[in-house]
Image: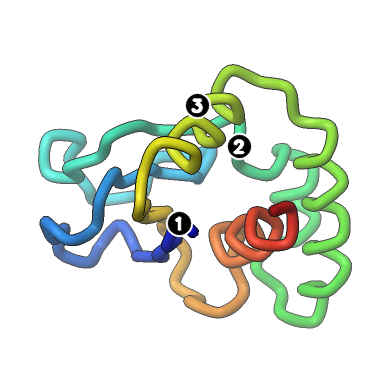
Amino acid sequence: MIEIRLKRAYEEPARSDGPRLLVDRLWPRGIAKKDAKLSDWLKEVAPSEELRVWYDHDPEKWDEFRKRYGWELDANKTEDFRKLKNHIRDQKRITLVYGAKDEVHNNAVALKDFLQREK
């Protein structure tokens, strides 16, 4: 079974991270692309712009956000989602990288939960 880790883009990359996959639609502020040490930037796996704006990192909307994001992921047939599934199939560990300050209520947490339920 694959280990899926979560890490803020502002945390130091580690060798033990495995492939580091940015799962935000927007690039994290203040991070140079050369310093991010990412394997891939999977923009199309991130919540839609509409959902991201609606959620606005409001913890009170967390449960509804997770449900709506899950619906988006169920319907996601993008190249980025295929790449993510390939990483999951081919690796023992991946790290989902995100820029949000809230380490509990963010799209990477919801994505990890979705991927673990999907198995």
Q: What is the spatial separation of the Cα atoms under label 3 and label 2, in whole angstroms?
A: 10 Å
Total marks shown come to 3
Please report the residue visible at 66 percent of the width from the left and 20 percent of the height from the top. Answer: 78
Q: Does dot 3 land on a helix, a strand or a loop?
A: helix
In the image as oriented, which residue stretches furthest toward the top?
Answer: 79
Please report the residue visible at 71 percent of the width from the left and 80 percent of the height from the top. Answer: 59
Please report the residue visible at 48 percent of the width from the left and 43 percent of the height from the top. Answer: 88
Side of 58 where 34 appears, left or right: left
Front in this rendered view, residue 103 or 117: 117
Side of 87 where 47 appears, left or right: right
Q: Is residue 89 above or below residue 51?
A: above
Residue, disc 2: 45
Task: Give the quadrant of residue 36.
Answer: top left
Q: What is the spatial separation of the Cα atoms under label 3 and label 1, in whole angstroms?
A: 15 Å
Q: Please name which of the two marks, 3 or 1, marks the residue nearer to the observer.
A: 1
Please report the residue visible at 49 percent of the width from the left and 30 percent of the height from the top. Answer: 86
Task: Give the quadrant of residue 13.
Answer: bottom left
Label located before the other in sequence (1 or 2): 1
Label located before the other in sequence (3 or 1): 1
Residue, disc 1: 2
Q: What is the spatial separation of the Cα atoms under label 1 and label 2, in whole angstroms?
A: 18 Å
Position in image of residue 72 (x %, y %) = 81, 40
Query: Callout 2, which amino acid?
Result: Val
Q: Does dot 1 land on a helix, a strand or a loop?
A: loop
Side of 99 where 117 appears, left or right: right
Position in image of residue 22 (x %, y %) = 40, 44
Front in this rendered view, residue 30 or 79: 79
